[in-house]
Amino acid sequence: RNPGAYPDKIKTSLRVFDHLFAEFELNYVSAMVPVKSAKEYDAQLDVAVLFSESLERAIKAGYVTREQIEDCDPTVMITVPRLAIVCGLLIYPLGALNVDRPPDQLSEMFRPFQTLLGKIRSCNKPGPAAILDLKLQ
């Protein structure tokens, strides 16, 4: 599609979303934390499963190919975490990235970003068509 064909409201929303995500990514990478307990280990496993399931959805929807993943295509490597986080917030809202539960129940690596993740979720309701397409599959 031609990006100029989108309404200004959509373009503005996408800019806000991209800015919030860039802020999250910078802070997230800066704050990687080691596992400290069995509960935290389970929480991190839930996040790993979320990333895996999101990647499988993207493959089934034709957004990425297994070859791109095997080749560590930079576009895919940047996109996968974003896709997984958006899926976690919108498709699996009661899962690993449930920002409505108490902070101590969120994986420690995401805990400092609970408010920011909530803002990202809000920016995507009802969600871009691509995310909704993933939800239907």
Image: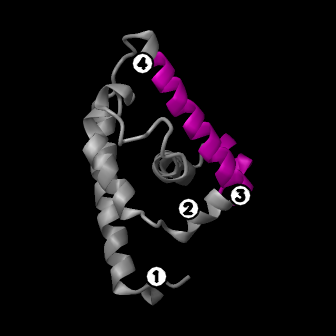
Residue depicted at x 32% and y 37%: 28
Q: Quadrant of the N terminus?
A: bottom right
What is the spatial separation of the Cα atoms under label 2 and label 4, in whole angstroms? 28 Å
Instruction: Kindly identify the amino acid type of the residue bearing the numbered disc 4.
Output: Glu
Report the residue marked by disc 2. 131
Q: What element does badge 3 sit on?
A: loop
Q: Position of residue 131 (x, y in %)?
A: 55, 61
Q: State which tag comes first along the sequence, 2 or 4.
A: 4
Report the residue marked by disc 4. 40
Q: Is residue 33 left or right of residue 95?
A: left
Instruction: Kindly identify the amino acid type of the residue bearing the numbered disc 1.
Output: Pro
What is the spatial separation of the Cα atoms under label 4 and label 3, in whole angstroms? 30 Å
What is the spatial separation of the Cα atoms under label 1 and label 3, in whole angstroms? 26 Å
Residue depicted at x 34% and y 45%: 25
For the magenta stretch, what is the residue range?
41-70
Report the residue marked by disc 3. 137
Q: State which tag comes first along the sequence, 3 or 2.
A: 2
What is the spatial separation of the Cα atoms under label 3 and label 2, in whole angstroms? 10 Å
Q: What element does badge 2 sit on?
A: helix
| 1 or 3: mark nearer the eye | 3
Q: State which tag comes first along the sequence, 4 or 3.
A: 4
Report the residue marked by disc 1. 3
Q: State which tag comes first along the sequence, 2 or 1.
A: 1
Q: Which secondary structure class fits the magenta region best?
A: helix
Q: Is residue 81 visible to us here? A: yes
